Amino acid sequence: MQSNYWTGRVNRRRLMQAGGTGIAAAAFLAACGGGSDSGGTSGGETKDATSLVTKPVDQTKDARKGGTWLGTHNADIQTFDPHFQSVPNQPLTQIVYSRLFKAKPGMLKPAIWGEVAGDLAESYEYSPDKLTLTIKLKAAKWHNLPPVNGRALDASDVLFSWQRLEKTGTNRTLFANSASPAAPIESVTSPDPKTVVLKLKFPSASLLSTLATFTAGSFYIVPKEADTPGLDLRRTQIGSGPFMLSEYTPSSRYVYKRHDGYHDGANLYIDQINMPIVTEYATALAQFRNGAIYRYGTLAAPSVRGEDVLSTKKDVPALQLFQGEVQQQTYSAFFGWNPALGNKAPFRDRRMRQALSYSWDRDLFIDANYNVSDYKKQGIDLETRWNTPIYNVAEGWWVDPKGKDFGPNAKYYKYDVAEAKKLISAAGNAGGEPVDAYYVTTGQYGPNFNRQVEILINFANEAGMKLQAKPIDFNTDWRPKVADTMGDFPGISFRTFPEGSQDWGDRLYSVYHPKGGINYTGLFNTDNSTWKNGDPKLTEIIEKVRTEFDTPKRQALIKEFQQVDAPEMYRPRFPGSAASLALVWPTVRNEGVYTGADIQYVGQWLDPTQPPAKS
């Protein structure tokens, strides 16, 4: 199956690149209602006369409360604990629990990377030496569920949450100096019920972004009753966020209801969210086409695959097509580093990592996964970008490897199979034993992950690497045997790294710094054979950027990081991505109005006069 898919997809793309003819756009546009001069749709959005794409329009003035959002979730859950990091529970954690700060959304324009706004924080003030942060809390209430029963949230809950995070949180090394000397927070105290005081070990430029981290395992605020026998946060959820858990049936579904006491509830309209657990892409797509799911994935990360978007739109013309920003690519390759593994960990050799990068045809990968060529035939031009260790959407921080500003080390991103083969041979791996390639195949990383991994394995094997796929069970073996071992596994693996902080100093620290915690990959450079000791140059850059308060200087340091990392390829992010195209049923309003990774359901409302709510 993997080989057939790969052969057909690559041959198709290369044929198109050689000038093959495409589908007639005019007929398809006509079939979908495009190509006329009468812009507009029944729901108030505007549509380009020559495009299938609907432009977002703020319809808040017409918003009405009520309705049940029909959604889906791609996995059952290991734990609901917000202080435990797990990819499947992250989106569920975000809608239930509050933090002190959150990422500031954009409105009808991209969010500015790194900007934060208060969540529970009403206001805040630094001391002159930036070693004390004083936060005034908003008036907020817990969900109306026992044992908290809708009581007011106060500083004692924040203190309890801090103590719990400091002791058991899987991301505590980002926050607590007691867990890592590179983490900034020394203590959290409270002079009164509405005030929280953070004492810092050193000034931290990334502190507010760190506090806004939405990755599960971070500083979410939980009720102080969580230490009582009657409340087990592993089995249930009680927070102060916009939605509260109403029902959870293992392996079946989640149901959430609106929290009417939510402290930022002015733009909270939806009564209920139904999330059946659907692990298979084909099943979820069929339910979406039938109107049983209002939006499959999000505008920022749509789940309908690129090659299925146009055919789905053609078959179901009522669906609206929205174009978003270039999609964040959260997946990465990472390597086994333990010297004791010997030849079973060949990617300890920099030449093998360089060869892997040279084997990746980044433009072909983007075209195959995001259907760029087919969209272009329909008159839809999608922006595409390659990745570096920095998201290709992080304006001001990401440096384009195809641009002149990257410098000579951009060569390590080019596609060059001949050079890859030379490096493999020089490293002594030509004709060697197969190399294990681990990845999860059971849906926890989304519907497109497995296919993208298969493409990258085939790229590598085309250059002579002999990677052999090794599916691994997410619930039993993935974390203890691969993901959380800091490189103590053979071969190579592929995963998504939970990178919730909006600050690049924090993000790089968690993955590349030897004291970064659970997500540290275990790397060491060619000149330093001590496993888990990091790369001294990159460690130095990370430490500088985390204490530098001047934004242009911080951006220059992040640029330097990308240039230094290029020949090392310690954790190559998947090749790149294109602007998103998401299909949404018209009953969903304000689609695309609010932007940013922290926005889920808030600000959107349901129009019962539009399909599929009204068939």
Image (spheres, rainbow, N blue to C red):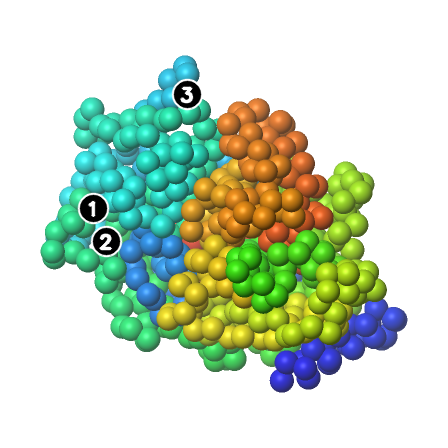
| The disc label shown at residue 130, or none | 3
Evaluate if marks 2 and 1 touch, with contact meaning CB atoms under 8 Å apart.
yes
Q: Which label's residue is closer to the chain start, 2 or 3?
A: 3
Sort mark 2 into few (<14), some (14-19) or many (20+) by Cα contacts within 10 Å: many
What x and y, as percent, mark residue 161?
Answer: 25, 42
Q: Quadrant of residue 424?
A: bottom right
Residue found at x 12% / y 57%: 230
Q: Residue at x 23, y 62 (%)?
A: 235
Residue 76 vertical position relative to residue 114 in the rendered view, above or below: below
Q: Is residue 289 above or below residue 35?
A: below
Mark 2 or 1 closer to N-term?
A: 1
Residue lying at 43% horizontally and 58% vertically, measured from the top left: 484
Q: Earlier in the sequence, mark 3 or mark 1?
A: 3
Total numbered circles:
3
Query: Considering the numbered disc 3 on the image, is that residue within a helix, a strand or a loop?
Result: loop
Which amino acid, by three-letter code, is at mark 1? Pro
Q: Does the CB distance between marks 2 and 3 fall below 8 Å? A: no
Q: Which residue does the numbered mark 1 point to in the structure image?
A: 223
Amino acid at circle 2? Ile
